[in-house]
Amino acid sequence: MRLLIKDGCIVDPSQSFAQVADVLIVDGRIVEIAGGLTSTAIDPQIPGTHVIDASGCILAPGFVDLHCHLREPGYEDKETIATGTEAAARGGFTTVCAMPNTQPPPDTAGSVRHLLELVEREARVRVLPVGAITKNRAGQEITEMGDLQKAGVVAFSDDGSPVRDGRIMRNAMLYSTMLGLPILAHCEDANLSEGGDMHEGPLSTLLGLQGYPAAAEISNVAREIALAELTGAHLHVCHVSTAGAVELVRQAKARGVRVTAEVTPHHLLLSEAWVSGSMFQSLSLGGSEPMLPIPP
């Protein structure tokens, strides 16, 4: 099949390339990227020839989602491999890393192989499984991480369950370093955050809701960075939401610690102001600037 995609805005960070151009694809392979390619570049007499007008669209290499919740097996009422990867494909994501918040979690080689069998049957895009750090994500006993790697996992995480015991996390980092795979850490001091409804501050007090202090994230990020520095592990901090955690990651990178991080769209675009509802939309809390207006 021959395909000509016309006038798209091509963005490829790996090549430092960003410009409007045409892309010629033959039998699934890109054979030319240039401006001003015409239909003569693609013989209209050849069966399967197709021209797509991509004006106003972005063409880019497939996106990768490092933190995806497919929830199958066990929680198919929330998401499935088929529905999650269909949504990924429609959004331009061609590879997703499936977090281990399933039941059972991928904490044994057998459960990883079962997951990959489901992926083979159901997935619309490439799925890379993330194995559990501890058995049943309970934070008590490290999984057989070497067996999980052989079965096909690309990283280790207990996802929404923070590893409370620093000794267990240290040992997990040591094993992950020997295996050459990263630790994806949910950084939260659950003793500080337990029962919290929203960010702790003047607004939570005003609304009568139990606060979740920023220190719950910041203190755990500091611990995990210290352990990564001690062990030489590659630490990836999941869904950073506080300025203090960002600064810790920045400082650690400057020292040469192997740490990376991610952020979610809602942490970038929303704030505690949205919890208040329209009745508080013009309220000012301890400063001269009012909170962002909240649409009806």
Image: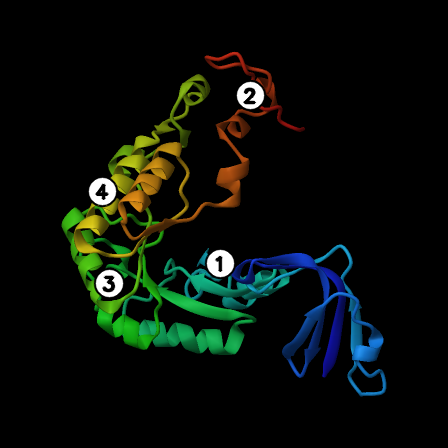
* Cα distance in 3D space between marks 4 and 3: 17 Å
Of callouts 3 and 1, the N-terminal one: 1
Of the two numbered discs 2 and 3 on the same chain, state the one appearing first in sequence: 3
Measured as percent of width and height from the top left, residue 39 is found at 83, 75
Q: What is the C-alpha distance between the residues marked 2 and 3?
A: 44 Å
- Marks 2, 3: nearer the viewer: 3
Q: Looking at this view, is 19 or 294 the one in front?
A: 19
Q: Amino acid at mark 2?
A: Met
- Residue 10: x and y in percent read 66, 60
The residue labelled by disc 3 is 176
At label 2, counting other C-alpha atoms closer than 10 Å, the crowd grade (few under 14, some 14-19, many 20 or more) is some
Picture residue at 40% right of the left edge, 42% below the top: 240
Instruction: Give yes or no for contact between labels 4 and 1 (Cβ–Cβ under 8 Å).
Output: no
Badge 4 element? helix
User: How many other residues sit within 10 Å of disc 4, few (<14), some (14-19) or many (≥20)?
Assistant: some
Q: Position of residue 243 (x, y in %)?
A: 39, 33
**Residue highlighted by disc 1:** 65
Please name whichever residue, 175 or 281, is drawn nearer the observer in this view of the structure.
175
Query: In the rendered image, which residue does mark 2 sit on?
Result: 291
Label 1 packing within 10 angstroms: few (<14), some (14-19), many (20+):
some
Labelled pair 2, 3 in contact (Cβ < 8 Å): no
Q: Where does label 4 land, which residue?
A: 223
| Amino acid, disc 1 | Asp
